[in-house]
Image: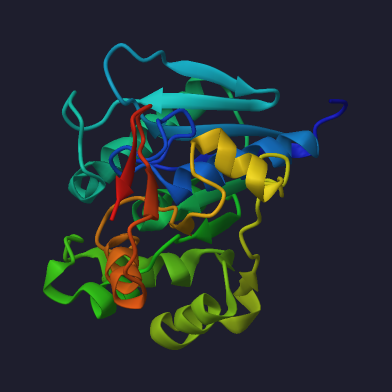
Amino acid sequence: MGMSNGRVAFISEHASPVALLGSQDAGGQNVYVDEVSRNLADLGWDVDIFTRRPSPTDPDEVDWAPGVRVVNLDFGPRAPMLKDDMWPFMPVFRDRIREWVNENNRRYDVIHGNFWMSGWVAADLGLQLGVPVVQIFHATGLTKRRHQGDDDTSPPDRIDVELDVVRIADRIIAQCPAEASELIQDYGARPNRVTVIPSAVNIERFRPVDQLEARRQIGIPDDTLLRCYRARTHAISSGRWLASSTSAMVTCNSCWLAAKRANPISAQLRS
């Protein structure tokens, strides 16, 4: 890889690149942490990713990719946890990171917080260590409350914590202009500290293929009407709207809805 450009500490309390995508609370943030850390390593950066140990049998450290190490730390009960239940344990998470940094004599050039809880950890560590903090929220509490209302399960402290992180972070990444506007208008972020960096696509994995060949590989006849939707099944990115809109648009005997789950089982539902 050559000489290192520097070291980055990724903080991502619930979203590890090692997790099975599509499982509980494992989705876009996991992909982001995985892809960005790998690409930073390709550019010559050393990356340590701090996250919660998923189970007692998982190792302390995982050499995830060249230049990328996952550091599993213990906080909270030794059992699966929903991410919304992790907030009370963030001071412990912060202290575990600080202990690991001291024990391993690590010095970082940038701390990168992911999500609001890890943003709090990143902001506090940045102040303690004198290291610049780059924050990405992945989703904000005000936007979630606006769309989910009473169904929002976020801890009541979330929005106040996000306001503090916005105030402290040296740079905030927005993934689209709408998010940048929300950060500036809803959270009072300084415009010169907000940078729009759209999430990209791994074009080696997601690439055009011949349509007929793709249909044959998944066992769908060439002339069948197909609606395809890819997302996790939860309240925001749910496919229920697709099923209802498809049934409103067309009634036929050969309309397929293909669903891909987190495990090897896939469902093909004929309408």
Residue 150 image offset from top left, x and y in percent: 11, 73
Residue 52 image offset from top left, x and y in percent: 34, 32
Q: Residue at x 45, y 81 (%)?
A: 182
Q: Residue at x 61, y 74 (%)?
A: 193
Q: Residue at x 31, y 11 (%)?
A: 57
Residue 55 image offset from top left, x and y in percent: 28, 20
Q: Is residue 109 at all visible to an observer of this figure?
A: no
Q: On the rendered structure, is 193 left or right of 4?
A: left
**Tell me, what colour scheme is on the image?**
rainbow
Closest to the observer: 123 or 263? 263
Q: Is residue 102 above or below residue 235?
A: above
Image quadrant where residue 266 sits: top left
Q: On the rendered structure, is 151 left or right of 23?
A: left
Q: On the rendered structure, is 1 left or right of 155?
A: right
Q: On the rendered structure, is 241 left or right of 133?
A: left
Quadrant where the C terminus sits is bottom left
Q: Is residue 245 above or below residue 44?
A: below
Residue 164 image offset from top left, x and y in percent: 38, 68
In the image as oriented, which residue stretches furthest toward the bottom? 185
Closest to the observer: 264 or 120? 264
Image quadrant where residue 80 sits: top left
Closest to the observer: 266 or 43? 266
Quadrant where the N terminus sits is top right
Q: Is residue 79 above or below residue 220?
A: above
Q: Residue at x 65, y 52 (%)?
A: 201
Q: Is residue 75 at all visible to an observer of this figure?
A: yes
In the image as oriented, which residue stretches furthest toward the right? 2
Image quadrant where residue 58 sits: top left
